[in-house]
Amino acid sequence: MSVDYIKIIGLVGSLLLCFCGLPEVWKAFKNKNANGLTTLFVVLWALGEVFTLTYVIIEHPKDIPLLLNYIFSGIVISIIFFYKFKEKTICLIKKIIKKK
């Protein structure tokens, strides 16, 4: 049984990228906003996750570690996205309600 070092390197890199957003999630949760991150960064990150997950699902559907990485990263960016745009969404809803 030989060790596939390239797969280990890929898995470690994947895990590191997967967990690098957790400090931002914690900060956003604690502060109840994600104002420290620019809108462009959050939108590009979210789009990158969507496109890459789509690619992985189509091209590598049996690569469970890779799929889990992008699913987890998608959850992380979703939480950050929520905190980044929460106030704007609430304000928009209030404006719509006032108009009625």
Image (tube, rainbow, N blue to C red):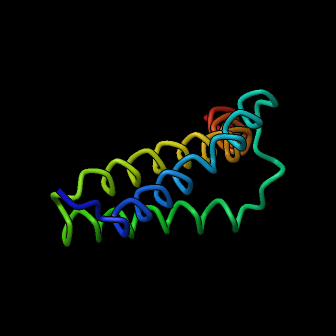
Work out which quarter of the rendered image holds the N terminus and state it.
bottom left
Please name whichever residue, 85 or 30, is drawn nearer the observer in this view of the structure.
Answer: 30
Residue shown at 22%/58% (left/top)? 63
Quarter assignment of residue 89 = top right
Residue 70 placement (x, y as % from top left)? 40, 54
Left or right of 9: which side holds 55? left
Please name whichever residue, 33 or 91, is drawn nearer the observer in this view of the structure.
Answer: 33
Left or right of 35: which side holds 100? left
Work out which quarter of the rendered image holds the C terminus and state it.
top right
Residue 60 placement (x, y as % from top left)? 20, 67
Rendered view: 9 above or below 78: below
Q: How many marks?
A: 0
Residue shown at 44%/44% (left/top)? 72
Residue 80 placement (x, y as % from top left)? 63, 44
Please name whichever residue, 52 or 5, is drawn nearer the observer in this view of the structure.
Answer: 5
Residue shown at 71%/30% (left/top)? 29
Residue shown at 58%/63% (left/top)? 45
Residue 92 placement (x, y as % from top left)? 67, 43
Left or right of 1: which side holds 34? right
Please name whichever residue, 29 or 99, is drawn nearer the observer in this view of the structure.
Answer: 29
